[in-house]
Image: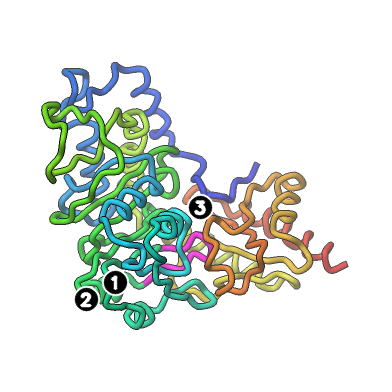
Amino acid sequence: MIYLNNAATSYPKPDKVINSINKALNALPSGQFRSGGIFSDDDLFSECRKKLGLVFGIKDVDRIFFSSGSTEGLNQILFGLGFKANEYLTTATEHNSVLRPLYNMGSGEPVIVPCDENGKVSPEDIRKSITHDTKAIVINHCSNVTGAVQDMDAIGQIAEEYRLCLILDCSQSAGCMELRIDDWNVSACAFTGHKSLMGIQGTGGFYIKKGIELKPLIYGGTGRDSRVIKYDGDYEYEAGTRNAPGTAGLSAALDFLLETRIDVIEKKERQLTDYFIAEISSIPGVRIFGKDIEKRGPVVSIGIDGVKPSDAAYILQNGYDIVTRSGLQCAPLIHKYIGAGEDGVLRFSFSYFTKEEELNAAIEGIKDIAMSAAG
């Protein structure tokens, strides 16, 4: 089986991730501040925070909180700030983890900034879309549809200039490209562990800058000061029992990333992506969405004339043993801007472990499907 759906969940995982999870499951449970178990308070979770700080460019690592992933993290941020929907400015590139919370707040609708045919958002369009109601900018760092990477230096300057909260969705970028959260003036960001961070599903978290307080979505035991029942500020964001085995795996995955070096990973994935695009560009009947992106993540979405994306994905999986992803990719607004139809796109996404021969097999599969459709 050839797996080219890494933008959904990366596979395979580094061996040390699997070994670390097995070790955690076979050990006494971590106390997470609650007992005198095998881990001290500054062990598993705190060490993982420190490594996340190195990957994300965050100095104040105590402001990183663990969750089940980006969806929970984004909901916590967007609802926790207490803003109205119309006080958020966001973009057409966003995932439903941003759009659905904003459109279901019951307080109007967010301002949507368009993107170009590559999925790129102009910082000037963001500037022009700011109104007197705007309190926050929410933006996807790397599109999960076209792979377009947004200009966070410029967008961060705009947020600072207008004194707006800047909320960044790092789901697709964390682990496969440089992040400079502190330098970009980011107020809050969310990340997931199971994509390019190479951890497992159900891991991830969010960061909130010091001075920004969110009202929690979830209340419960934290093991810190059980006498506090009603909060008056100074909220806690990790209620309930955290995913210790998953965090052990994420910590090991971060070790792999730091040892391998993210710039090395990014370079290899870009080479694979460029090679794939170059090879399929000459296939008649194949359209590449976001072909002309200067800086991109390891994602390529295509359309094949006369073939629904879902049908092409079915043929590749059942006829060629190649796993891809078809449809709207949980990002429903971007498709009209990039020229994709209502059926969405056929997406190929790569990882550090993807091999060139796997891409060649996919290229041949695309050729066969396109030729058959052309008659």
Residue span colored magenta: 142-150
Does residue 176 show up? no
**Image spot of residue 353 (x, y percent):** 50, 47
Question: Residues under labels 1 and 2: Cα distance?
Answer: 9 Å
In the rendering, at what x and y percent does residue 103 appear?
44, 59
The one nearer the camera, 138 or 63, is 138
What is the x, y in percent for residue 17?
39, 34
Q: Is residue 149 within the magenta segment?
A: yes
Label 2 sits on a secondary structure element that is loop
Residue type, numbered disc 1: Thr
Residue named by callout 2: 162
Q: Earlier in the sequence, mark 1 or mark 2?
A: 1
Q: Are marks 1 and 2 in contact (CB under 8 Å)?
A: yes
Element marked by disc 3? loop
Residue that numbered label 3 is attached to: 7
First in sequence: mark 1 vs mark 3: 3
